[in-house]
């Protein structure tokens, strides 16, 4: 099959089959867009709509009979506040620990002259495929006396191999050997090189890592389920679990104005549906606010990781 | 000054390996600071990853907290035997493997399709919007995802049943029906992760030489032909690596999410090895028994990983190791 080779490539029109193909592509992408966006819009709308309209299905896309009662109830719930504060603390401390462990390690592994580079990398990669398992890890954390403390949530996950590798790749490609050699010849110690040369250049990777680890901390629940019994130390996701999954709204009876009138109880039942949606929004709020601005950093982080192959 | 000039005169850069032992010693000594920098990571891996490996031996013992790991008595393969002989053994295997394979079959191709499709669209607001929106669910916590699923599927107030009723169908409590468990698990997983998983493939596709496409276009190839003959083969190595890695975690299906989705009514389908391990070990305090099951789980994963890796080596040039 041959068509005359046209020299001006920019004026080759899309053939008919190509246009149909493209139309199908667009249709698929629009479908994907709608499938993903619809539940998100629905939740946001439902959280401010009147409960009966939501439950009956009358409200199905945009808010109807707007009410903020769901949100006011949520804001009065002490468990949620405490969970929020706990999670903020865990996230800030946890991410700091993550950076403290990951960034220097990634840098050291990027140095060609680090003697133990191969051994250390192998040691790390092995842990990706072999692990002690849930129970031995649990016993370890217990024996270290970390149960019921924030450190049980932070230390076992202090670094991920994937993130260290991404960091290493970043340093390998952004800190030229000549720079390091020049610093060494100027008599700088390794510490000095790290603090004066590497750290200032590492802002992008620190940002990406802080994001990755930060979101991980914000969203974690399983470790808290394992190690934390004290309800006052519950992170937000554990409180959410009670409300959204265990179907128990009265996680703290004293904050619910629950008098035992049948009508009021009925109202609570109705309210519970929109409270659930409101709680989902409240819990994901920081991520929602931050996401659009930082999306490109997240994507860049994944791309850095994929370069390693 | 002299030292500087001799260094500049040397062939190899100061950073590459030198052969003399004295130099190597000097190099190691002068890198002590590098060791300090990497120390936190080193300690972390030793304590929290290799430490539990030491504790794995309790799978062969009768672990009692009061006696410690060292002091607890050996029982050999007793726990494994108990597990294999149990009435629930096959149900657990069936559920675990079933959910994994279902997840893989549905969830593996979709990110690839999405990336290939997005790649055909020229850069602009539409493309950006699709990307931003489809990536978003990845950042939602698993608790919220399951909360969404439960709320949407509620027989009385969920939007799905409302829609079904509107169309004249009966409303149904899907979360309580074991037959629907896998599907709900897989589809919600696809919803959450397809967008984000496509980023890796997008990154790979951006590495294709545009001249290949130009040449193909001049030769009269349609978009579809170009996609099939250029893009798809280019993605093969990435696909294979990811597929291998997925096989390595077949037996450790997302226990965090399953745990949240489980209820007494869908147990026949939702009881998987990992959640069973959690229940036995942490709720019933049968540490050794649960550890044995966990070990069995890891062993199967490792075998699958090696097996798939070997096949991939034979069939293509790509493999994980």
Image (cartoon, coloured by chain):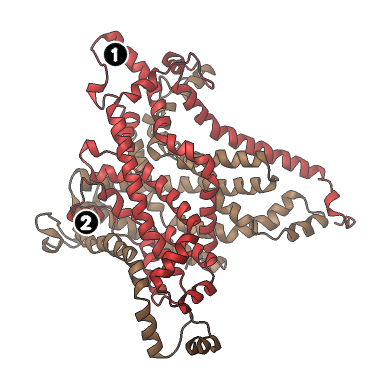
Chain colours: A red, B brown
- The answer to whether one can see residue A135 in this image is yes
Q: Quadrant of residue A266?
A: top left
Q: Residue furthest front?
A: B1
- What SS does tag 1 mark? helix
* Visible residue check, residue B109: no
Which of the two residues, B44 or B311, is positioned nearer the viewer here?
B44
**Chain that bears disc 2:** A
Q: Earlier in the sequence, mark 1 or mark 2?
A: 2
Residue at position x 34%, y 72% in the image: B35
Which x, y percent locates residue A53?
A: 46, 14
Please say if A2 is above or below A211.
below
Q: Nearer the viewer, residue A63 or B163?
A: A63
Picture layout, residue A209 above or below residue A111: above
| Mark number displayed over residue A140 | 2
Badge 1 is on which residue?
A265
- Which residue occupies 43% across, 51% down? A210
Nearer to us in this view, A94 or A279:
A94
Q: State the image quarter where residue A274 is shown.
A: top left
Determine the residue positioned at 58% across, 49% down.
B112
Characterize the local packing of mark 2: few (<14), some (14-19) or many (20 or more) Cα atoms within 10 angstroms.
some
Residue B261, labelled with which disc?
none
How many other residues sit within 10 Å of disc 1, few (<14), some (14-19) or many (≥20)?
some
Q: From the viewer's perspective, is residue A256 above or below residue A84?
A: above
Residue B94 at what x, y percent from top left? 37, 46
Task: State the image coordinates of residue A69 (x, y, percent, origin top left).
Answer: 39, 17
Which residue extends farthest right? A4
């Amino acid at each position: 099959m041959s068509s005359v080779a046209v020299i001006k490539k920019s004026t080759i029109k899309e053939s008919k089959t190509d246009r149909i193909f493209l139309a199908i592509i667009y249709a698929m992408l629009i479908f994907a867009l709608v499938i993903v966006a619809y539940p998100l819009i629905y939740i946001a709308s439902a959280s401010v709509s009147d409960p009966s309209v939501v439950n009956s299905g009358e409200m199905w896309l945009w808010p109807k009979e707007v009410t903020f009662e769901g949100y006011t109830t949520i804001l009065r719930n002490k468990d949620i506040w405490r969970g929020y504060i706990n999670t903020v603390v865990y996230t800030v401390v946890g991410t700091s620990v993550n950076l403290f462990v990951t960034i220097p390690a990634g840098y050291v592994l990027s140095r060609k002259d680090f003697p133990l580079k191969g051994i250390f990398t192998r040691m790390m990669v092995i842990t990706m495929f072999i692990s002690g398992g849930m129970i031995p890890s649990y016993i370890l954390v217990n024996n270290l006396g970390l149960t019921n403390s924030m450190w049980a949530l932070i230390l076992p996950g202090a670094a991920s191999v994937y993130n260290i590798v991404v960091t290493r790749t970043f340093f390998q490609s952004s800190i030229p050997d000549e720079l390091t050699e020049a610093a060494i010849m100027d008599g700088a110690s390794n510490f000095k090189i790290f603090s004066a040369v590497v750290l200032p250049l590492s802002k992008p990777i620190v940002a990406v890592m802080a994001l990755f680890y930060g979101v991980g901390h914000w969203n974690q629940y399983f470790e808290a389920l394992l190690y934390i019994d004290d309800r006052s130390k519950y992170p937000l996701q554990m409180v959410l679990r009670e409300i959204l999954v265990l179907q128990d709204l009265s996680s703290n009876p004293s904050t619910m104005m629950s008098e035992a009138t049948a009508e009021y109880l009925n109202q609570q039942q109705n309210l519970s549906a929109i409270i659930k949606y409101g709680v989902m929004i409240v819990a994901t709020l920081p991520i929602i606010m931050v996401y659009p601005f930082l999306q490109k950093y997240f994507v860049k982080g994944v791309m850095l990781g994929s370069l390693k192959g | 000054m002299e030292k500087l000039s001799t260094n500049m005169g040397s062939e190899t850069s100061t950073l590459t390996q030198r052969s003399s032992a004295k130099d190597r010693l000097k190099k190691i000594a002068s890198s002590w600071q590098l060791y300090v920098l990497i120390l936190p990571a080193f300690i972390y891996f030793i304590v929290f990853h290799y430490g539990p490996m030491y504790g794995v031996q309790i799978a062969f013992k009768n672990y009692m907290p009061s006696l410690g790991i060292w002091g607890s008595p050996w029982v050999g393969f007793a726990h494994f035997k108990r597990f294999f002989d149990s009435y629930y053994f096959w149900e657990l295997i069936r559920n675990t493997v079933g959910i994994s394979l279902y997840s893989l079959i549905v969830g593996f191709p979709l990110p690839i399709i999405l990336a290939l499709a997005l790649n055909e669209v020229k850069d602009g607001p539409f493309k950006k919007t699709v990307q931003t929106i489809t990536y978003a669910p990845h950042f939602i916590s698993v608790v919220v995802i399951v909360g969404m699923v439960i709320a949407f599927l509620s027989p009385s107030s969920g939007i799905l049943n409302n829609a079904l009723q509107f169309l004249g169908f009966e409303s149904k409590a899907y979360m309580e029906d074991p037959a629907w468990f896998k599907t709900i698990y897989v589809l919600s997983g696809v919803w959450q992760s397809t967008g984000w998983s496509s980023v890796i493939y997008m990154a790979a596709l951006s590495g294709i030489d545009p001249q290949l496409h130009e040449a193909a276009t001049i030769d009269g190839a349609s978009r579809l032909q170009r996609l099939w003959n250029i893009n798809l083969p280019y993605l093969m190595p990435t696909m294979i690596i990811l597929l291998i890695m997925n096989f390595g975690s077949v037996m450790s299906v997302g226990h965090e999410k399953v745990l949240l989705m489980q209820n007494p009514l869908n147990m026949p389908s939702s009881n998987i090895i990992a959640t069973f391990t959690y229940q036995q070990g942490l709720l019933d305090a049968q540490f050794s028994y649960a550890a044995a099951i966990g070990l069995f789980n890891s062993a199967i994963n490792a075998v699958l990983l090696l097996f798939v890796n070997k096949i991939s080596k034979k069939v293509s040039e790509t493999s994980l190791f």
